Image (cartoon, grey):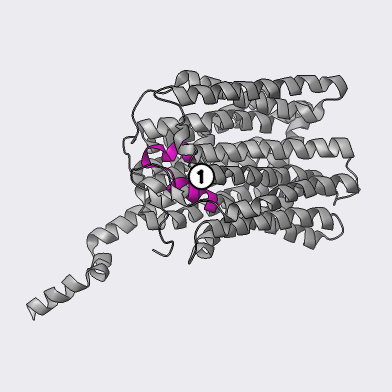
Amino acid sequence: MGRLGTGRRATSPRPDAARSPDAARSRGAHRRALAALALADVAFAYQQTAVVPVIPVIEREVGISQAWGAWLLSGYLLVATVATPVLGRLADRRGRRAMLLVGLGFFLAGSVAAAAAPAPVVLIAARAVQGIGGAVFPLSLSIVREEFPRGRVGAATGVLTGAFGIGTALGFATAGALTEAVSWHLVFAAGAAVVALALPMVVRWVPSRPGPSGGALDVPGALLLSAVLALVLVGLTLLPRSKGAEWAVPGGLIAAGLAAGALWFRRENRVAEPLIDLRTLRSPAQVWTNGVTVAIGYALFGTFYLVPQFVGNGREGFGAGTSAVGLYLLPLALGQILGGPAARTLQKGGTPRRPLAAGMAALAAGTAACGLVGGASRPAFLAAVFVIGCGAGLTISAGGTLVNVTADREHAGVSTSVNSTVRRVGGGLGGQASAAVLILVGSGRAGWLTAFGLAAAFALVSVPFAARVPLSSAGSGPGAGPLPDPGT
């Protein structure tokens, strides 16, 4: 009998292995690590978005113009766009948990400083410090790649995308109420409290490992990349507010940024230890996914800009007050919460291309519906915003999975960071292009149709590209070769 029992175990090792104490401990460790990363993403997303509905209140209370108030978003976006690939590269060298803690630490410091800001310049500077923590979400994705079995990376990515949606929903839903009940200072204080809660969980439950990549940090390359992104983003920020000959200033900044970008590409291809190994990013899967990600950022951030403007418009929109503006964006966040985990379900029997293409189609349909419905029907408009959120959850989760598992192990951190940066650049294009349309066409019916329609067109054109993303991974190390069967 003993031999027969041993024989059964020998011929059927998988069920017993699944019930073994080691396997149970491994699953428990993965769940705890995922919970810590999810809370970090909730805190990050909350603080990133909660400021959006209350910017008009901040402008009035601290006595700054709309142009300066815009820097509460633009300053954060600028620093985050520059800092994210740098922290991603450092994560590949020094360890991903270590850089995640650095990002959370800066985010906490910026949140505390913003909550206690005595003057507008301090508040804008605090938001810039928060931008250094902009790498929190992509670093959490690269940690999942490092710690989880490859067959579970997609599911964990969906959970983190859903957590990002939860933080976004909390930010939109509570910011107005907290501001009206107490003060806009409380919005930043609440975010700081959640970041402070996430930090010890990450320390305790996320394993600390040395970075898989060696070499020195390419400081000149980092500075040149910072110049590229800063010039382009500042130019895009100034462009909609410029008239006539004033367009020469933002146009010159953008041209200088593109020229600096050419120099940066040339340098990265020649130095022995580049900031970003362009060979990794040149793989077809990375190029196609990042190309689609530009459209994701355009549609998503374009919506973030357009919806508050539209619902507050008393002539074409709904004439909503400050406290209600965030509630109109709440369906978007709820859709993202559902869309992230749904990407894994939609992928079964296929590949991440399926949820990526479906998500792009949802982004196109939702943004087009917002323009077509307009202020004629509040329920229909909210339903359209919900569809946008579902598309955002599907695309961010599927895109994150693709760049994560198709990068070699040594560059997973910088690959996910670059993908996040590309989404922000697309977002900068979307927000500024939407603002430019409303300035040039006007805020009448034609202006809203054009602005929403342009975002929908970007998303729609990307659907066939999303459906055909090449699936071979880069490099020759762990993770090389075709993507695994998603059902495993």
State the image quarter where residue 243 is shown.
top right
Q: Name the spot of residue 397 as percent of width and height, x first.
A: 53, 52
Q: Name the spot of residue 343 as percent of width and height, x first.
A: 54, 59
- Can you see residue 247? yes
Residue 468 is inside the magenta segment: no
Q: Which residues are magenta?
A: 397-415
State the image quarter where residue 183 is shown.
top right
Placement of 400 over or under 214, stated as above or below: below
Q: Residue at the spot x=61%, y=32% of the render?
A: 115
The kind of residue on which mark 1 rests is: Pro
Point out the image quarter for the N terminus.
bottom left
Q: Is residue 183 left or right of residue 212?
A: right
Q: Is residue 90 left or right of residue 464?
A: left
Is 206 in front, or is 215? 215
- Can you see residue 62? no
Placement of 402 over or under 218, stated as above or below: below
Residue 413 is inside the magenta segment: yes
Q: Residue at the spot x=55%, y=40% of the render?
A: 420
Placement of 107 over or under 254, stated as above or below: below
Q: Which residue is mark 1?
A: 284
Is the residue marked by circle 1 packed among few (<14), some (14-19), or many (20+) residues within 10 Å?
Answer: some
Q: Name the spot of residue 390 as percent of width and height, x first.
A: 63, 58
Q: Is residue 399 left or right of residue 32?
A: right
Q: Main secondary structure of the magenta part?
A: helix
Point out the image quarter for the C terminus.
bottom left
Q: Residue at the spot x=75%, y=23% of the render?
A: 251
